[in-house]
Amino acid sequence: MSFFKRLKESIASKTEAITNKFKDGLAKTRDAFVGQVVDLFSRRKKIDEAFFEELEEILIGADVGVNTVMELIDELRAEVKKRKIEDPAELQPIMTEKLVGLLKGSEEQTSLKMNPNGITVILFVGVNGVGKTTTIGKLAWRFKQEGKSVLMAAGDTFRAGAIEQLEVWGQRVGVDVIRQGAGSDPAAVMFDAVQAAKQRNVDVLLCDTAGRLQNKANLMEELSKIYRVIQREIPGAPHETILVLDATTGQNALQQAKLFGEKSGVSGLVLTKLDGTAKGGIVIAIRSELSLPVKFVGLGEKMDDLQEFDAEQFVHALFAGLASEEGESEEEA
C-alpha cells in the first residue's frame, strides 16, 4: 500500500472516530429532540399552521431558545412559500441546512487563536461546577499530543481544593502547575506563571481562574487585574478568554454567556457535559443569540472526549437517525 493511500485511510479513520464521538455524545438530545421531529415530519401530511406550532414547541423544548426558534420558523415559512413545498419530508433537509447556518462561524473563529511569535496564553472563566478544571486538563493533554510544551496556572485560589484538582490533572497529563497557597492573590499567581512560561520557553500557558458569580463586582475586578498583569508581561495576551459552560443547565448557560460576554471580554466558549443532557439545542441558542464561537464541546469522560466544535458534524450527528428512520418507513410502506 502506498504512503498516500495509508495517509488517506488514516485520515478517514480519524474522521469517522470523531463523527462517532459526536453521535454518541449527542445520543440523549437525539433520542428526545430528533425522535419528536421524526414523529412530526412523518405524522403530519401537510405543512400548515398546526405543523409549525408543533415544530416550534419541540425546538423550544430542546432549549434551542425562543428567539432562535422564531427566527428559524420564519425562515422555514419563507422557504415553504418560495419553493411551494407541501410535504413535510421535503422540509427536513432545509431545516438541517438552516441549523448548520445558525451554528457556523468562520474557521478562524472556531479555531483557537494561537500566538505565532511566542507563548499562547489562554484564560478560562466560568462559575464553579461547570467542568472548567477538567477542560483545562483535557486541553493540556490535547496540546501535548500535538507536540507542544504546556504550563498551567492555578489562578483559582478561592475555592477549596481547586489548586489540588488542577495539580492532579497536571500529574495525569504530565504538565507542571504554577501555584501559590490558598487565598493568595490570583494576579500574583499569573505573574509567576508568565515568568515561568518565559523562562521555560513553553508554547502554551493555560490559566485557571476562580469560579466567578457574575454579580460579584470584586471578583470581576480581580479578573481585570489578572488581565492587566498578563497583558503587561506578554503584549496581546491573553490570546483567548474561554468561557466554560455546563450544557446540562440549559437556558441558565445562555444567561451566563450573556453576562460573562459583557463583562469579561470572552472570545469563545466550551460547552461541557453535552453527553449528559437531552437539551443539546442550547448550543444552537448560544451560537445564534451571541456573537461568540463555540470552540470545543465535551462529549464524555475520556481524555479525547473534548472535541473541536464543527457545526456540520454537530447537526448531522444530531439528525443521524432521521435518514435511516425515514428510509425504514418508506420500505415498510
Image (cartoon, rainbow, N blue to C red):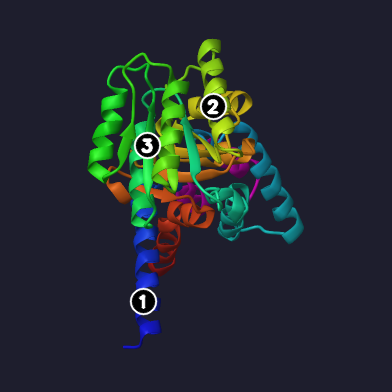
Seen from the viewer's position, the closer of residues 239 and 231 is 231
Q: Real-space Cα distance between discs 1 and 3? A: 35 Å
Look at discs 3 and 2 and give the one toward the viewer.
2
For residue 309, above or below residue 130: below
Instruction: Mark 1 or mark 2: name the one nearer the start of the chain.
Output: 1
Q: Is residue 112 visible?
A: yes
Q: Quadrant of the C terminus?
A: bottom left
Relative placement, left or right, of 83 versus 172 is right
**Helix, strand or loop for disc 2:** helix
Q: Secondary structure at mark 3?
A: strand
Residue indicated by mark 2: 229
From the viewer's perspective, is the residue at label 1 or at label 2 nearer?
2
Which x, y percent locates residue 198? 45, 41
Name the mark on residue 9: 1
Q: Which mark is residue 152?
A: 3
Q: Quadrant of residue 289?
A: top right
Separation (CA) of disc 1 from disc 2: 47 Å
Q: Nearer the viewer, residue 174 or 109?
A: 174
Helix, strand, or loop for circle 1? Answer: helix
Location of the N terminus by quadrant is bottom left
The magenta-colored residue range is 36-57
Image quadrant where residue 237 sits: top right
Going by the numbered disc 1, the residue's amino acid type is Glu
